[in-house]
């Protein structure tokens, strides 16, 4: 027999079968000891990444909620600032009105005091006029006694004196 390049004999088929069985066993062994841990590692990593993505999505939702809450607070702060300013304006206006009212009361007191002082001065002036009239009357009496004149002259002197003093002063 001549040697062939590819000889199919029983030994080759047995070797090929054995090699296939050993490759299958090696595949099962590699699958159990290498592929399963790699699959478990990949599965854990996939779950971890999924958890991180879910956590990131939840964090983004929380951040959006916080952002809207802070924006609402900022709007409320502006409203509160407006209320505070409005309150301050009202208090300032009330204070201004109080100051104006106090000033008007003080002005009224000053005017009343001035009126009272004017009345006192008027009474004092009237008293001074009456004193002067008494002095003038006594001077006139002295003149009348000195002159020893008659009643016609005396009446004319009294009328002349009254005209000098004025009737309104004499009557008040």
Image (tube, rainbow, N blue to C red):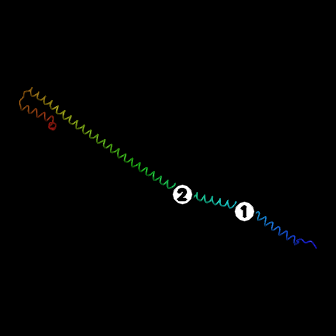
Residue at (54, 57) in percent of width and height: 65
Q: Is residue 118 left or right of residue 52?
A: left
**Badge 1: residue crowd in 10 Å (few <14, some 14–19, many ≥20):** few
Residue at (58, 58) in percent of width and height: 58
Which of the pair 159/59 is nearer the observer?
59
- Residue 7 coordinates in the image, percent (x, y): 88, 72
Q: Is residue 110 above or below residue 79?
A: above
Residue 36 is marked as 1
Which of the pair 144/25 is nearer the observer?
25
Q: Secondary structure at mark 2?
A: helix
Which of the pair 113/68 is nearer the observer?
68
Q: Nearer the viewer, mark 1 or mark 2?
A: 1
Q: Is residue 73 above or below residue 119?
A: below
Q: Residue furthest bottom?
A: 1
- Residue 145 coordinates in the image, percent (x, y): 9, 27
Residues at marks 1 and 2 touching, judged by CB atoms closer than 8 Å: no
Residue at mark 2: 65
Placement of the C terminus among the 4 image quadrants: top left
**Badge 2: residue crowd in 10 Å (few <14, some 14–19, many ≥20):** few
Residue 73 is marked as none
Distance from disc 1 to disc 2, alpha carbons, whole Å, reads: 42 Å
């Amino acid at each position: 027999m001549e040697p062939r390049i590819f000889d199919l004999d029983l030994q080759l088929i047995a070797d090929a079968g054995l090699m296939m069985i050993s490759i299958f066993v090696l595949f099962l062994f590699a699958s159990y000891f290498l592929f399963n841990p790699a699959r478990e590692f990949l599965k854990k990593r996939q779950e971890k990444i999924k958890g991180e993505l879910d956590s990131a999505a939840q964090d983004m939702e929380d951040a959006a909620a916080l952002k809207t809450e802070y924006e609402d607070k900022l709007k409320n702060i502006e409203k509160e600032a407006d209320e505070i300013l409005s309150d301050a304006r009202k208090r300032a206006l009330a204070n201004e009105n109080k100051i104006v009212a106090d000033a008007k009361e003080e002005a009224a007191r000053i005017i009343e005091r001035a009126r009272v002082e004017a009345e006192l001065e008027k009474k004092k002036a009237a008293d001074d006029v009456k004193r002067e009239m008494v002095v003038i009357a006594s001077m006139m009496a002295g003149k009348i006694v000195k002159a020893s004149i008659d009643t016609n002259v005396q009446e004319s002197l009294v009328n002349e004196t009254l005209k000098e003093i004025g009737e309104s002063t004499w009557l008040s």
